Amino acid sequence: MSSGIRALLLVFPMVIFGLWGALHTPDPDLDRDRDETDDVALAQLPPLPRWSRADLPDFSSYSDTTEKKAAFFSFLYPRIVLANSRILIERAYLQSLSDKDELSKSELTWLKNQAERLRVDEEPGSADMFRRLENRLDVIPPSLIMAQAANESAWGTSRFARRGNNLFGQWCFSKGCGIVPQSRVDGASHEVADFDSPYLSVRSYIQNLNRHPAYQTLRDVRLKARSSGDDASGSSLAAGLLDYSERGEEYVKEIRNMIRYNNLSYYDEKFRSVRDSSQQQLLKLASASNEEALLTDSQDDATGGEG
C-alpha cells in the first residue's frame, strides 16, 4: 500500500467525524454557560427559575428499568415545557412585530439578534425575515426530545450526560469546551460539549434543530403541520433527522420505535394545553417556581419567580 493511500485512510475518518460532528455543534457563544435572556433580550421573558440550574440525577441508581424510564421522563418534561414555553412567548412577540407598520430601534435590534442567533440572513424587518424567523422560532414536540435524549445519553447514564449534562451528544471544537471522547481518532479536535445544566442542553438541542441547515426537512414538516392547523408529532418530525446520525434511516427508525414503544406521544398530547395557553399562562410556565407544577395538566400551580 502506498504512503499516499495510507495517509488518505488516516485522514478520511477525521473528515467524516468532523462533518457529522458539525451537525451536533452548539454555538459556544450562544448556547452554553449563559442565561437565556442574555442571548436575545426580551422584557417579557421572566428570569429562569432556580430549579432549571439543577444537575442531572443519578439514573444509574435505578435497578428497575420501568422506574428509571419514568424518572427520566419526569425529569425531562418540565425542562421541555420550560424551554418551549419561552419559545412560544418569543414567537408571539415576533408575530406582534410582523403586524406593525413601523418598528422601533429596539424592536429592530431584537429582530437582528434573533436573526443572527437563528442564522436568518434577510433584510431586518422585511417580510422574508419574518417568514423565515417564524419557521425557525418554534417548539419541538416533547416525544422527539425525550426519545433522542434517551437514545443519545443511554437514559441519562452516559459519561457525557453524567459529567457534562449533555443529553444529545452535541460536539464542540474549542479546546477545553467539553469532554474529550475516549474513542476520538488521532488528529481529531472535537470534544463533547458540557453544559451547566440539563436544561441548557435541552435548549441548545432545540436551537440546533431550529437553525442548522441539515434539519430543514424537519422544519418544513413542522411548518406544513402548522399551516394546516395541526401540531406536528415527534414521529413525523423524526423524518428530518437523517443527518443527526451516520446511521441515517436506521437512526430515524430507532427514534420512532422508541416514541411508539414508550408511548411518548402521550407527552405530545399533554403539551397541547401548553401550546394553547394564553400569554399570561405561558409567562407563569416560563417562570414556574417548582418543576412539579409543570408535570401537572393544570397550569394553576405554575406560579412565577424563584421564591
Image: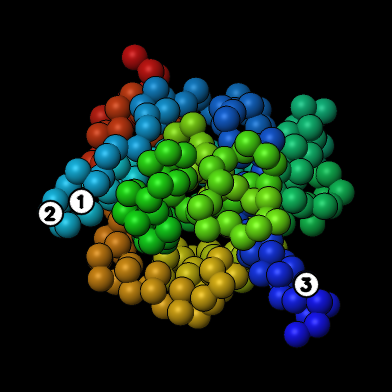
**Residue ID at (81%, 44%):** 125
Q: Which of the colour schemes (rainbow, by chain, secondary structure, one colour) is used?
A: rainbow
Decide if residue 138 is on the left or right side of residue 255. Answer: right
Q: In 3D space, how far apart are the residues under numbered discs 3 and 1 (Cα atoms)? A: 46 Å
**Residue ID at (33%, 67%):** 259
Within-10-Å neighbours for mark 3: few <14, some 14–19, many 20+ = few
Q: In 3D space, how far apart are the residues under numbered discs 2 and 3 (Cα atoms)? A: 48 Å
**Residue type indicated by callout 3:** Ala
Q: Which mark is residue 192?
A: none
**Residue ID at (52%, 58%):** 183
**Residue type indicated by callout 1:** Lys
Residue that carries the numbered disc 2 in the rendered image: 64
Percent position (x, y) of residue 166?
A: 47, 45
Within-10-Å neighbours for mark 1: few <14, some 14–19, many 20+ = some
Residue that carries the numbered disc 3 in the rendered image: 7
User: Which of the two marks, 3 or 1, is nearer to us in this view?
Assistant: 3
**Residue that extends furthest to the right in the rendered view of this protein:** 123
Q: Secondary structure at mark 1?
A: helix
Circles 1 and 2, Cβ within 8 Å, touching? The answer is yes
Residue that carries the numbered disc 1 in the rendered image: 68
Placement of the N terminus among the 4 image quadrants: bottom right
Find residue 300 and report its image quarter. Answer: top left
Placement of the C terminus among the 4 image quadrants: top left
Which of the two labelled residues, at mark 3 and mark 1, occupies the earlier sequence position?
3
**Residue type indicated by callout 2:** Asp
Q: Nearer the viewer, residue 121 or 186?
A: 186
Within-10-Å neighbours for mark 2: few <14, some 14–19, many 20+ = few
Q: Secondary structure at mark 3?
A: helix
Q: Nearer the viewer, residue 277 or 135?
A: 135
